[in-house]
Image (cartoon, rainbow, N blue to C red):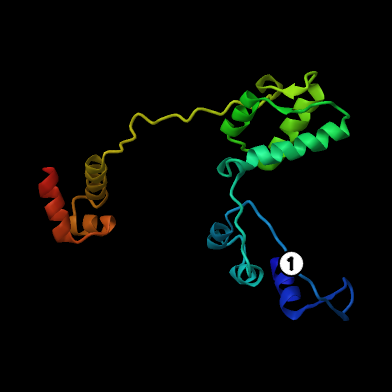
Amino acid sequence: MQAKLLTAIEKRQISRLGTTDTIPIDVRLISATNANIRQLVEEGDFRQDLLYRINTIEISIPPLRERGEDVLLLADYFLQRYTHKYKKEINGLSREAKQKLMRYHWPGNVRELQHAIERAIILSDSPLLKPANFMLQPQPEKKVNADEVLNLEQLERNAIERAIKRSEGNLSRAAEYLGITRYALYRKLEKLGL
């Protein structure tokens, strides 16, 4: 499919299924993805030449959690939209509700915010939305690996030990694994007392 799309874009013509006649086309292509397109190219799942063809102007839109006050602007927009749709007399968000919305991670981005506001409006009896009106999914706690070392010297020591083990004691090969010279490896071994 990617090859056919590339051909249509480059030649500016298509042919209907079952015919050999070509039809000229004049199109502007707008495409969007939430995938890492460059990684897909590297993995061979997306054609590089097609990416070059469609990537004339690239606009990167950060996720909602990185856009700060946009959460409240969008919340106000959806509040107006859904109070009108459901004919509800809701005047806004309490300060605490705003803080809750700002602190939330929004893994579902704008759609999740939209549905959270809509649900809150449908279920609310109050003229002001409060934190309790928002049934947001609790964020999973990130488990810290007890073995995770952040000390640079310890990280360097671990990397050197793994490289030596992987190279079965061959220091020239270990230095290659580490991306340093053999002489630099000797200095590091001496410095770390290995």
Q: Residue at x 58, y 44 (%)?
A: 67
Residue ranking furthest to the front? 91
Q: Residue at x 66, y 68 (%)?
A: 54
Give residue 136's position: percent from left, percent from top: 65, 27
Task: Determine the secondary structure under disc 1.
Answer: loop
Q: Nearer the viewer, residue 128 or 50?
A: 128
Q: Residue at x 64, y 69 (%)?
A: 50
Looking at the picture, does residue 158 appear above or below residue 34? above
Q: Nearer the viewer, residue 117 or 138?
A: 117
The answer to whether residue 145 is visible is: yes
- Name the quadrant containing residue 186: bottom left
Q: Residues within 10 Å of mark 1 (few under 14, many from 20)?
A: few
Looking at the picture, does residue 31 appear above or below residue 99? below
Dot 1 corresponds to which residue? 29
Give residue 97's position: percent from left, percent from top: 65, 26
Give residue 194's position: percent from left, percent from top: 13, 44
Query: As shown in the figure, which amino acid type bears the numbered disc 1?
Result: Leu
Looking at the picture, does residue 57 appear above or below residue 11? above
Q: Quadrant of the N terminus?
A: bottom right
The answer to whether residue 108 is visible is: no
Q: Position of 78 compared to 21: left or right?
A: left
- Name the quadrant containing residue 148: top left
Q: Position of 134 compared to 190: left or right?
A: right
Q: Residue at x 83, y 31 (%)?
A: 83
Q: Nearer the viewer, residue 150 or 65?
A: 65
